[in-house]
Amino acid sequence: MEVRVVDELLLGVGSGGIERIVVARIRAGADLLDAIEEVIRREGIDKGIFLSAVGGLRKAVFRGLRRLPVEFPVTDEDRLYLEVEQPLELLSISGHVSPRDDGQPNIHAHFSAATVNEDTIVTLGGHLTRGTITALKVAVVIAVLEGIAMRSVYGSESRSEELVVS
């Protein structure tokens, strides 16, 4: 499905409301992305946005772009995976949940976490990937959306999944 250009600045705009808020406590030692996928499955969430996330992490894997490729799609050669295996404070998760054409949810989430580097507190952020492991008091809050047309489709320009709203 092609993304329709609405105007020079926007590819799509949609509006709706919040059906409900889901709050999940996640066990220590869990892979954070796996736990979020389980919450989405159990709660039947097909459209949502991340509102908040807090708690302690034992390990984090941040994914970021080294460079934009000349030709898409972005590949692992264009990315940096930074593993931090020491105590971190989960500061936030942002992003969305949207259904794919096959009905399965697509989770596009970024997160930030702070850790200590010598005598300095540093904050890191990136795409949430597998391998980010919880330590304690982790809670994730998701707003389940209603009345908004949003889905994940394959984008012909990016050659990857993209959010479409209308």
Image (cartoon, rainbow, N blue to C red):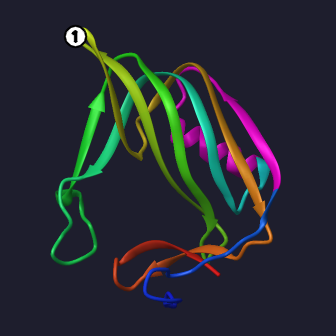
Residue in the picture at 64% in, 54% down: 49
72 sits left or right of 91 in the view: left
Q: Which of 44 and 145 is in front in this view?
A: 145
Q: Nearer the viewer, residue 108 or 51?
A: 51
**Magenta highlight on residue 153:** no
The residue range painted magenta reads 19-42
Above/below status of 84 relative to 49: above
58 sits left or right of 81 in the view: right
The secondary structure type at the circle numbered 1 is loop
Residue in the picture at 52% in, 36% down: 92
Q: Which residue lies furthest to the right in this view?
A: 19
Q: In which quarter of the image is residue 25?
A: top right
| Numbered circles on residues, count | 1
**What residue would you read off at disc 1?**
118
The quadrant of the rendering that contains the C terminus is: bottom right
59 sits left or right of 141 in the view: left
Residue in the picture at 53% in, 42% down: 93
Q: Which residue lies furthest to the top in this view?
A: 119
User: How many residues crowd around disc 1 within 10 Å: few (fewer than 14), some, or many (20 or more)?
Assistant: few
| Residue 14 x, y percent position in the rendering | 67, 75
**Magenta highlight on residue 38:** yes
Above/below status of 134 relative to 117: below
| Residue 24 x, y percent position in the rendering | 71, 34
Q: In which quarter of the image is residue 38?
A: top right
| Residue 64 x, y percent position in the rendering | 29, 49
Residue in the picture at 35% in, 20% down: 115
| Residue 4 x, y percent position in the rendering | 52, 91
Identified by mark 1, the residue type is Glu
Above/below status of 65 relative to 131: below
